[in-house]
Image (cartoon, rainbow, N blue to C red):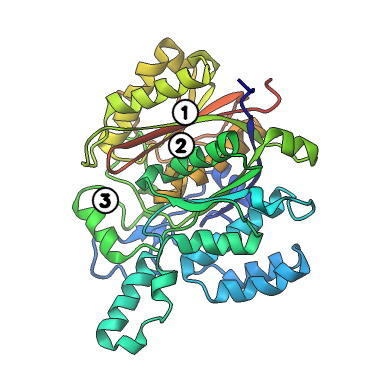
Amino acid sequence: MPEEKRVVITGMAVNTPLGDTLDVFMRNLFQGNSAITAWKGIDASKIACKIGGDLSGYDVQGKVSLLQGQIPADMARFLPRLVRKSPWSAQFSIILAVSAFLDGYLFDKSVNPELVAVIIGSHNINELYVQNNLGRFAEDPDYADAALAVKGVDCDHAGCVAEIINAQGPIYTNGGACASGNVALRSAFNEIRYHGMNLALVLSPPHDVSPATLHSLAQVGALSCVSFNDNPARASRPFDTAREGFVFCQGGGALVLEELGHALARGARIYAEVLGVAVNSSASRTPNPSEKHEARVMESLLRNTGVQPEEIDYVSAHATSTQLGDLAEIRAVKSVFGAHARKLKINAAKSILGHCYCSAAVVETVAAVLQMQAGRLHPSINIEQLDSEIDLDVCANHPVEHQVRCLMKNAFGFGGINSASLIRRFDDK
């Protein structure tokens, strides 16, 4: 059999309330600067949830102008028009795609567009745009956006991205709730390893969330909406005894995956190597986490990649700040890693960012890879009283100097979707 292709990360981008560049994003993570404030762009007057990571004031046009000076002239002319005609969330998809390709120096090289794939990790992305247009339609059908049928569907994001970067390979969306990013990463990995692509862009944009969804999440007990509305920065607190639910954040990220030989041939900067992604089901639609099946997905990932538990130095935890979820994940980690679990470093990006929902896994993978590069881990903040059962090193409240050779990124979604990815330093042959 031919040797399996190796897949590496050669470009990244983020856009969150903590920053829209990799440097600023990581500086705020290392400093533990919370992204959580009172909602400004969402009318929270009638809902229980008053706080979140808000991107409503983001200067889209300013970012477009900045990007125009760094990309080819024909793209620079087209970019403002494409952004202007797109819904709010799709605007971020376009910006993230261009930013990730710039970070990968892909506009400086000749890349065969027929061998470039785009996978969007998310679903129901344009939720508020659709809801608002349905409301306008109810008032008067002519008030609704005539392009709603096109712009309202998730695949519009893939189409916008393909158009701006000229991706002519397969383009599609993968939904997996809060595991969507890892599900998309798995698809991109497979497009390169098994389907002949040279490049695959994995992208998860900020979710255009509606007040109705936020209120529903609060009603089922998933969101923090009781104790911290007056002190938003303290609301997201994975591993702490006072955790009461996750905090929604509008944020997005992108990863450029590339076949190793193609990356080396063009002299690409290689951030890290993706060893594999595993996904399974708890066979239950309830939002309750399953320690058994979370452990099973980690075990299958290690088995299928041939990586020993002792080779893992760091786990970027899903850690949503829910009572059941945080405990289930820690118990699963202990089950899989045994005695080595006490040598692991674990942190929770959601303590600082909040929960980027379908985009969480991509955003947090970007953060994990940047920490690998830096030899330093950001803190898990707001741990005032550590849960007594969480007796592993969760980087409580302070950044930690730590050299990471191989990391695991967990992501678990509603519908019983469990996932984990393995990423290794490229210089570890």
Residue 331 vertical placement versus 180 (above, below) = above
Report helix, strand or loop for mark 1: strand
| Quarter of the figure that contains the N terminus | top right
Number of the label disc, if any, that sits on residue 380? 2
Q: Give coordinates of residue 388: x percent, y percent.
A: 30, 24
Number of the label disc, if any, that sits on residue 227? 3
Amino acid marked by disc 1: Ile
Q: Give coordinates of residue 173: x percent, y percent.
A: 45, 52
Q: Give coordinates of residue 362: x percent, y percent.
A: 50, 45
In primary-sequence order, the first of circles 2 and 3 is 3
User: In the rendered image, is residue 387 in sight?
Assistant: no
Q: Is residue 148 left or right of residue 30?
A: left
- State the residue at coordinates (36%, 62%): 209
Residue 66 vertical placement versus 221 (above, below) = below
Q: Give coordinates of residue 198: x percent, y percent.
A: 66, 42
**Badge count:** 3
Q: Is residue 296 left or right of residue 252?
A: left
Marks 1 and 2, Cα distance to the nearest angstrom? 9 Å
Amino acid marked by disc 3: Ser
In primary-sequence order, the first of circles 3 and 1 is 3
Amino acid marked by disc 2: Ser
Marks 3 and 1, Cα distance to the nearest angstrom? 26 Å
Residue 294 vertical placement versus 147 (above, below) = above
Q: Which residue is mark 1?
A: 346
- State the residue at coordinates (75%, 55%): 107
Q: Are marks 1 and 2 in contact (CB under 8 Å)?
A: yes
